[in-house]
Amino acid sequence: METVNALTLRNRLGEVLERLARTGEPIAVSKGRIVQAVLVTPADFEKRFLEYQSREKKRALLARVRSLRHPGVSPEAGVDALREIRGELGEAP
């Protein structure tokens, strides 16, 4: 990954952005020899951000499902009930 310092970025922003668009490789931005940010293409950002959002939504949904469980009913009871219903309807398990 290429690194540019903040001063270079400020003075040559257009060139740096063209290089980013051309290569598609992230560019680290440093200030005082410490990387402060990373420039990525919109496609990379969207991909990573959507993956993160998807994981967060999945966690939230799972937490909601768990919060709705009846405290006195085991998960196996639901499976048993489903098998019983299928049996009554004559469906194969």
Image: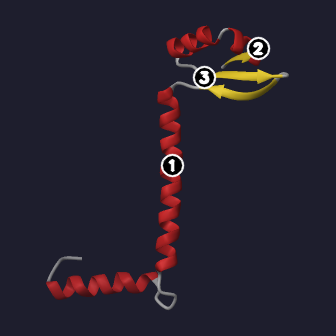
Residue density around tag 2, few if under 14, some if 14–19, many if 20 or more, within 10 Å: few
Q: Residues within 10 Å of mark 1 (few under 14, many from 20)?
A: few
* Residue at the image point whose x is 52% and y is 41% from the top: 49
Q: Give the residue drawn at x 66%, y 20%.
A: 1
Q: Is residue 6 left or right of residue 63?
A: right
Counting residues from the start of the chain, the first of labels 1 and 3 encountered is 3
In-image side of 34 versus 38 (left or right): right
Residue for badge 1: 53
- Circle 3: element type: loop
Residue type at mark 1? Gln
Disc with the residue nearer the chain's start (2 vs 1): 2
Distance CA(mark 3)–CA(mark 2): 18 Å
Q: Is residue 56 above or below residue 79?
A: above
User: Dot 2: what SS?
Assistant: helix
Do the residues under discs 3 and 2 have CB atoms within 8 angstroms? no
Which dot, 3 or 2, sits closer to the camera?
A: 2
Q: Check the image and name the residue furthest to the front.
A: 11
Q: CA distance from mark 1 to mark 3?
A: 21 Å
Dividing the picture into quadrants, the one containing residue 83 is: bottom left
Q: Position of residue 87 (x, y in %)?
A: 20, 85
How dense is the environment of label 3, judged by Cα within 10 Å: few (below 14), some, or many (20 and up)? some
Which residue lies at the image location 49% right of the left edge and 28% below the top edge? 42
Structure colour scheme: secondary structure
Residue with the mark numbered 3: 26
Tell me if residue 53 comes above or below residue 4 in the rendering.
Answer: below
Q: Which residue is mark 2?
A: 7
Residue type marked 2? Leu
Residue 73 is situated, as x and y percent measured from the top left of the image, at 46, 89
The residue lying toward the viewer, choosing from 82 and 10, is 10
